[in-house]
Image (spheres, rainbow, N blue to C red):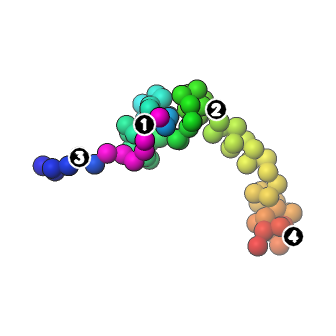
């Protein structure tokens, strides 16, 4: 039995969205791999999945990240 229980990193006053429990948490409660954040407010954390979805949509539409002619992954693209 361990003498010290390892706590997830984070601070009270920071808000997270737990992917496993689908809940908003203040401070570190679940492991980092299971949460999104930190967010500045409870409201921001409550909308974490919508924010992630919106960002994914933006990235999917960004021509710099497409595997098409003119994209970053081709010779004619702007990638390095």
**Circle 1 is placed at which residue position?**
12
Q: Name the residue: 43% across, 41% down.
A: 11
In front of the other: 13 or 1? 13
Specify the segment rendered in magenta. Answer: 7-13
Q: In the image, which disc is placed on residue 76? A: 4
Q: In the image, which disc is placed on residue 50? A: 2
Is 9 within the magenta?
yes
* Dots 1, 4 in contact, CB < 8 A: no
Q: Is disc 4 surrounded by few (<14), some (14 to 19) or many (20+) residues within 10 Å?
A: few
In front of the other: 65 or 45? 45
The first of marks 1 and 2 along the sequence is 1
Q: How far across and down, in percent of the image, does residue 79 sit?
A: 78, 68
Q: How far across and down, in percent of the image, does residue 50 sit?
A: 64, 32
Is 75 drawn above or below residue 72 in the view shown? Answer: below
3D distance between C-alphas at marks 1 and 2: 23 Å
Left or right of 54, for residue 33? left
- The mark lying in front, picked from 1 and 4, is 1
């Amino acid at each position: 039995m361990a003498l010290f229980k390892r706590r997830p990193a984070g601070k009270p006053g920071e808000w997270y969205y737990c992917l496993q429990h689908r809940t908003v948490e203040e401070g570190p409660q679940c492991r980092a791999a299971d949460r999104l954040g930190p967010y500045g407010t409870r409201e921001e954390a409550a909308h974490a999945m919508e924010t992630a979805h919106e960002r994914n949509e933006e990235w999917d539409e960004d021509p710099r990240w497409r595997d098409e002619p003119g994209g970053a992954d081709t010779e004619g693209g702007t990638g390095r």
